[in-house]
Amino acid sequence: MTTADLLLVALGAVAVGAGVLVVSTRHIVRAGLWLVVNLLAVAGCYLVLAAELVAWVQVLLYVGAVVVLLLFAVMLTRAPIGASDDLDRPRWPGALIGGGAGLGLAALFVSGYRWSRVDLPSPGTATALGEQIFTAWVLPFEVVGVLLLAALIGAIVVSRPDIGSR
């Protein structure tokens, strides 16, 4: 095993562990913070695989925007931040179903791909990728930006009772 393999396994273990903590914690803010750890570990996996642009997009979009939007939505809507009694349910059925689905998918991938190698075309450049993003894909990025802005404004309006009462 090379150093890259060991780093990939370690970061994968951190990502899986943080993912388990995201869905098993009873505090929603802590779940959001474990989601940050999970997404940063996935970005580290991208860095090990020499996909620096994808890693930085992961950090900027998911860690920097989506998680912050989630935490702002929780804080703006005055949702209960601590442990909730209504979430006190047995966890073993969900863990059993999730574990079974994960093992089934892992078996499917292993049987489907085995240890086959895929010859990829020559790697693209950042210039070519930037040209594609800012020419052919600029409209979807703008639409997503407007949609996220509308969601944030909607969360503010819903959380402020004095605005909706007029």
Image: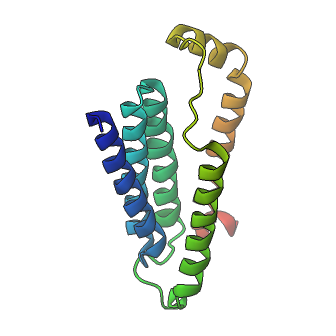
Quarter of the image containing the N terminus? top left
At 36% across and 42% down in the image, what residue appears?
A: 8
At 51% across and 52% down in the image, what residue appears?
A: 69
Q: Is residue 25 left or right of residue 118?
A: left
At 68% across and 29% down in the image, what residue appears?
A: 142
Q: Which residue occupies the foreground of this view, 67 or 99?
A: 99
In this view, the residue farthest toward the left is: 3
Q: How many marks?
A: 0
At 58% across and 44% down in the image, what residue appears?
A: 114
Q: Is residue 46 left or right of residue 152?
A: left
Q: Position of residue 101 (x, y in %)?
A: 63, 68
Q: Is residue 75 left or right of residue 94?
A: left
Q: Is residue 87 left or right of residue 133?
A: left
Q: Position of residue 92 (x, y in %)?
A: 53, 86
When asked about the image quadrant of residue 148, the answer is top right
Q: Which residue occupies the foreground of this view, 163 or 35?
A: 35
Q: Position of residue 42 (x, y in %)?
A: 43, 44
Vertical placement of residue 146 versus 92, above or below: above
Vertical placement of residue 137 versus 81, above or below: above
Q: Which residue occupies the foreground of this view, 144 or 153?
A: 144
Q: How is the image coloured?
A: rainbow
Q: Position of residue 19 (x, y in %)?
A: 45, 62
Quarter of the image containing the C terminus? bottom right
Q: Which residue occupies the foreground of this view, 61 or 19?
A: 19
When asked about the image quadrant of residue 162, the answer is bottom right
Vertical placement of residue 139 versus 94, above or below: above
